[in-house]
Image (spheres, rainbow, N blue to C red):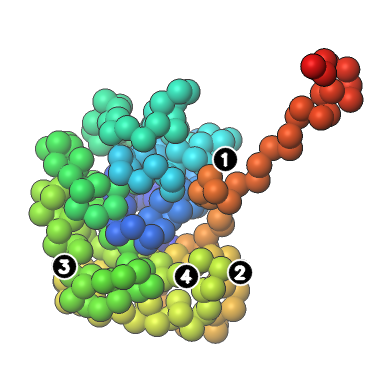
């Protein structure tokens, strides 16, 4: 099942928000790559903007290399500011929201604090060509009930001045995720969608877990996820260079 008809849809901006740990940045990166694959490099320009000014660890800018290799423009701080824990909002973001030739995915910071950045961008978000999707992860604290998710969405809407137009089901517990957990999360997202009067747009599931889902278990478009974002404390450390350089005679012993 396709997300939407890329050739005929007026949609040009997809804003993705969600509470901490919802997986919204991983979803944003994988969605941009999925759209690039479907659109082809010549049919439509693709861009992704990093608006997460709160969480310094899981941000779509960390996947700059595979995104740019796929022909996706990455709008995020570069060089010395790329890893800075600073509230840097690039002016190019406003241009993306007004660019009708580019389909943009915007990764918005978690909760109402992160969504507050959208308040300054709200005048540039055209309702007829924009979508604002909230990621529902039942495994997160306070987001395991319809009421809890509704309160989280209301806080984001109040802070941003924008209305959430759809949901993404992305229930996971990192490596402990099971197909049963995913399906339970989809059922919660369905109830939240019904209560909010918005559609459940897609289900995001890690590839290995998606392979274990019963055939026909999902009635919604499936976005298979590949793990592209990792925090610094689990990234492999470079090998120590001192001893190797000494053996090569490039460093002198003192």
Q: Quadrant of residue 50?
A: top left
Q: Point out residue 46 in the picture as x, y percentages from the top left corner.
A: 43, 39
Q: Is residue 146 visible?
A: yes
Q: Is residue 79 left or right of residue 127?
A: right
Choose the circle earlier in sequence order: 2 or 1.
1
Query: Given contact means CB atoms under 8 Å apart, are the residues at marks 1 and 4 in contact?
Result: no
- Mark 2 residue crowding within 10 angstroms, few (<14) / some (14–19) / many (20+): some
User: Whole-Å distance between the Cαs marked 1 and 4?
Assistant: 24 Å
* Residue under the image location 33 percent in, 57 percent down: 20
Choose the circle earlier in sequence order: 3 or 4.
3
User: Whole-Å distance between the Cαs marked 3 and 1?
Assistant: 35 Å
According to the picture, the residue beneath numbered tag 2 turns out to be 208
Choose the circle earlier in sequence order: 3 or 2.
3
**Badge nearest the viewer, 1 or 4:** 4
Outermost residue toward the front in this view: 254
**Secondary element at image label 2:** helix
Query: Given contact means CB atoms under 8 Å apart, are the residues at marks 3 and 1 in contact?
Result: no
Q: Quadrant of the C terminus?
A: top right
Choose the circle earlier in sequence order: 3 or 1.
1
The mark found on residue 203 in the picture is none
Query: Given contact means CB atoms under 8 Å apart, are the residues at marks 3 and 2 in contact?
Result: no
* Above-or-below relation of 99 to 197: above
The mark found on residue 66 in the picture is 1
Q: Point out residue 195 in the picture as x, y percentages from the top left corner.
A: 17, 76
According to the picture, the residue beneath numbered tag 4 turns out to be 173
């Amino acid at each position: 099942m396709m997300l939407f008809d890329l050739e005929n849809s007026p949609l040009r901006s997809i804003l993705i928000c969600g509470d901490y740990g919802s997986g919204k940045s991983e979803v944003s990166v994988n969605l941009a790559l999925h759209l690039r694959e479907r659109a082809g490099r010549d049919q439509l320009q693709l861009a992704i903007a990093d608006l997460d000014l709160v969480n310094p660890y899981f941000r779509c800018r960390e996947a700059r290399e595979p995104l740019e290799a796929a022909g996706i423009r990455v709008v995020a701080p570069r060089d010395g500011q790329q890893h800075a824990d600073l509230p840097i909002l690039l002016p190019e973001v406003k241009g993306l929201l007004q660019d009708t030739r580019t389909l943009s995915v915007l990764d918005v910071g978690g909760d109402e604090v992160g969504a507050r950045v959208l308040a300054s961008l709200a005048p540039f978000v055209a309702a007829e060509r924009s979508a604002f999707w909230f990621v529902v992860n039942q495994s997160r604290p306070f987001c395991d009930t319809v009421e809890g998710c509704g309160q989280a969405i209301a806080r984001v809407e109040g802070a941003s001045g924008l209305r959430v137009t759809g949901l993404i089901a992305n229930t996971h517990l990192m490596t402990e995720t099971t197909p049963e957990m995913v399906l339970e999360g989809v059922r919660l997202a369905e109830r939240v969608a019904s209560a909010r009067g918005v559609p459940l747009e897609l289900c995001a599931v890690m590839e290995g877990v998606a392979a274990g889902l019963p055939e026909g278990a999902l009635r919604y478009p499936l976005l298979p996820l590949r793990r592209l974002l990792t925090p610094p404390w689990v990234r492999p450390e470079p090998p120590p260079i001192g001893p190797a350089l000494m053996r090569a005679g490039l460093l002198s012993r003192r």
